[in-house]
Amino acid sequence: MNQVDLHTHTTASDGQFTPAQLVQRACRVGLKVLAVTDHDTVAGVADAQAAGATCGVEVIPGVEINTDVPGAEVHVLGYFIDPGHAELNEQLARIREGRVGRAKKMAEVLTEMGAPIRFERILEIAGEGSVGRPHVAQALLEAGHISSYSEAFTRYIGRESPAYIERMKFTPAEACALICRAGGLPVLAHPVHFDRWGKIKARFDEGGLLPGMLEAGLAGMEVYYTGYDAVTIEQLLNTARHYGLLATGGTDFHGIRPNEPDLGGVYVPMKVVRRLKEKAAANLANSAS
């Protein structure tokens, strides 16, 4: 039985469940270790850890920083970060402010395209969470402009779609360095993307971006992930070994996406957690010496 999920989201960003509810769900499905990795915020970590202490689920403090490169997005996960780290919180606040401006511009473009949605409604849907495209998608669905959540991305707000707006620029290497300064381990998230027909849509550009991320402290690569078959996992394991990176994994659970697996629905070996802890402890020892 799977006992680990290292990629999850709460209402602090764009998930359906509060941090406490997420942990309670993790307990019900038999998870022992959970990482809370909300987009560009650590606001849900403390509540999740408090809930974990109550029900016996170990909660690893994490974050997922969304970065942009020409023509693509690269997400960087951070594990064992210090949620109170001043610079980390300042930079994440800047990124979140950029998200708000981006959502407002998307609402304006969609209105011009004949699919009007209110910016205020996007903010209402996001609540206290970090504003993102899923909240725009929900507003489009509520307004009747689309018939499904996924249609929002294919028709309006996906990267190649007419209402897509770029985010504030923050590079993968900058994200890695920031996570390291906050005491964490940077990990490349979901390096392979598939289209709706199951074909590889985008593979991470190893030669173009990985050297800079490695120099900035990249420690791992997400190998076990939603939709990854045995062949993809083996290829990514080989890549991770080649570069001396730790293998990690998780569902990328939000609780709102169509056809997504339940929390813990992707098998992640417990040894992944052990190796992450060993690496984090070694880094801490090195910084203290």
Image: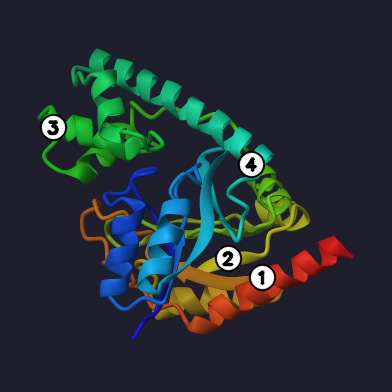
Q: Determine whether the residue tagged by mark 3 lies in a helix, strand or loop.
A: helix
Asked if 64 appears above or below 135 in the picture, the reply is below
The one nearer the camera, 48 or 277, is 48
- Callout 2: 10 Å neighbours few (<14), some, many (20+)? many
Front: mark 1 or 4: 4
- Amino acid type, callout 2: Met
Work out whether mark 1 precedes mark 4 in sequence or the reverse, and give the earlier one: 4
Work out whether mark 2 precedes mark 1 in sequence or the reverse, and give the earlier one: 2
Which residue is label 4 attached to?
A: 88
- C-alpha gap between disc 3 and disc 1: 43 Å
Q: In the rendered view, does 224 fall on the left or right side of 256?
A: right
- Amino acid type, callout 3: Glu
Which residue is label 3 attached to?
A: 142
Q: Residue at x 68, y 46 (%)?
A: 178
Which residue is label 2 attached to?
A: 221
Work out whether mark 2 precedes mark 3 in sequence or the reverse, and give the earlier one: 3
